[in-house]
Amino acid sequence: MSSPVIIRATNLVKWFGEDEARTIAVKQVSFDVQYGEILYIVGPSGSGKTTLLSMISGILRPDEGRVFVEDQDLWSMNDDELADLRLNKIGFVFQDYHLFPRLTTVENVAIPLILQKKEWNEALRLSRDYLEIVGLKDRADLQPVKLSGGEQQRVAIARAIAGKPDILIFDEPTASLDGDTGRKIIGFVKSNILNDKRAIIIVTHDSRIYEYADRIMKMEDGKIVGYENNHRYEK
Amino acid sequence: MKPVSGIYRVALKLLMNDKSKFTALLVGITFAVFLMVMMMSMFSGILARSCAPVHNIGAKIWVMDPAVNNTNSSIPMPDYILSASRSIPGVNFAVPLYFGSALVKLKDGAYQAATVVGLDDATLFGRPEMIEGRIEDIFAENAFVVVKDAEFSKLENPTIGTEFEINDNRGTVVGIAQVASSGLFGVPTLYTTYNRAITYIPSARFTTSYVLIEPKSVADVPGIQKAIARLGYEALTRDQFVRKVANFYTFKTGVGMNIMMMTAISFIVGLSISGQTFYTFILENIGKFGAMKAIGAKGNELIAMILAQAFVTSLIGYGLGVGAASTFIIIAKWRIPDYAAQLTFQTLGLALVMVMIIAAFSSYIGVRKVLQIQPFDIFRG
């Protein structure tokens, strides 16, 4: 029996540009994401992965179609409701991490908690716990620039999970990392961050980390061209 | 006490930990505030000194020729104006005042210009506060009271009994007095009686510089002013006279315009430096603000962060600028007794308003940029 669905996207369409420059980025895409799975969205550049990711995470409004997150119709919400949903339900790990260089590591991790209106000291205390989860408790008071790329990635993961989201979204998480570090990070995420009440969606080009996927959704020219399960990539 | 919201702490840490930007912002705003406060204080000091006789004499109503635009250039009025003033209903009393200048020949033979104030012989209305000697001695032969202000030393620091020559007449110092404010033109002030003043100092046919009126009540002032106007002269309350003098220096001499331009330039300098630096700071962090938006920060929270950054920095810069200007004025007054600048609440208030405009402008360009960034742009790199 399959796990319940956390995200359901139906007939998503997105256009960019106007008049003659108008191009379609995502064409009639429908798919589900289940609790407890790691779904990879893969495909060449320009295949619509990032656009699709943005539409299912409440960042980019689709021209057609609907997205349900835990049965809530995402695009019937106003901007503030969407911001609240992202804050409480979705954690993001960006390709360039986007850590504030002038804040310490622990303060960076605390940002979602502060946005959730947690008191400053409480937010820092909780953030230290999340840094401990990603193995960086001893780096809590350093600025991100003093950390290696892999460590910065883990800080970004700690920040993403700090708001206790049900969905984690990784955008090209290994793009700035060497192969070993990339694999370690994703392995760590699968072992320590994923659980039955959470789903992880990863957009990537990096076939070296396919082994950690539960499902791989392949995109080309804005369409889903097929799925592959993890067995094909097991070593 | 409710702790400062975490979002403001994050905002301030972001800015203050960027030491080069924060310092550049502070220096820009501090420098601008310093210049604005100095300019306005100087202007305020000049205005205060230009109106010094009005405050020092203290009359409630001043009657003068309508062409008079500052205290030092009085136009003598015929004696009947005094008599007419005394007969106006609502006038408690009216006295003449002589206000002019003369050359004083000092013991060493040098000449020194001085302002001579001739007080009504009967009442000595408008007399200064004595710090040495008695005011009654002003009725003695050749008697003058010297004001001990920043210009006092120009009369070779006279004491009671010091003699000098004034327009070929002997003058004797019978007292030392103090007044609330020194004059603008850097000359010492001598008080004597009205009759001695008009005798010692050559003048044209008319001799009364001003008629000072004490109304019976405030309600009588408009009636007195109308009656004086019917005589072809002008009766101004103390505040009106101060405003007339201030308007003269502000708009009819180069002083006001030049200082206003310098203040405006200081404002533009502050606006440019802080606006530019703040904009660069926002640009450098734009990706992070976009990431915060994606994470779940609402537009109003980002606006609050930017406002906190701009306004806190501006207020710190304001404090530093006012502190620097105050220190400068204190030291300057200590070293240069003639230094005219004075720090007033109006100056501080105006500088604060200008700093708030700088902060608002800086925030505006920051807010505009941050609200334009879409979280989708962060994904697209």
Image (cartoon, coloured by chain):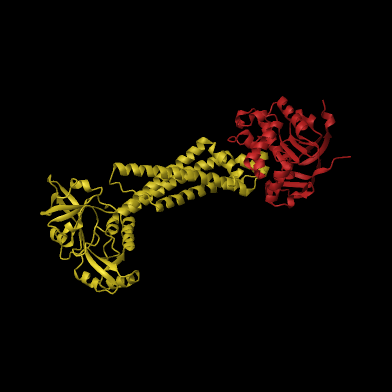
Chain colours: A red, B yellow
Location of residue A36 in the rendering, given as x and y in whole percent from the top left corner: 81, 37
Residue A225 located left or right of residue A111: right
> Outermost residue toward the right?
A1
Quadrant of the drawing holding the C terminus of chain A: top right
Location of residue B241 in the rendering, given as x and y in whole percent from the top left corner: 31, 62
- The one nearer the camera, A27 or A53, is A53
Location of residue B71 in the rendering, given as x and y in whole percent from the top left corner: 26, 59
Location of residue B373 in the rendering, given as x and y in whole percent from the top left corner: 62, 44
Image mark count? 0
The reply to whether residue A24 is in sight is: no
The reply to whether residue B314 is in sight is: yes
Q: Does B204 sit above or below residue A214?
A: below
Residue A187 located left or right of residue B5: right
- The one nearer the camera, B294 or B180, is B180
Quadrant of the drawing holding the N terminus of chain A: top right
Q: Residue at x 20, y 63 (%)?
A: B120
Give the quarter of the image for residue B220.
bottom left
Give the quarter of the image for residue B281.
top right
Residue A198 located left or right of residue A157: right
Q: Does B14 sit above or below residue A22?
A: above
Give the quarter of the image for residue B142.
bottom left
- The one nearer the camera, A164 or A181, is A164
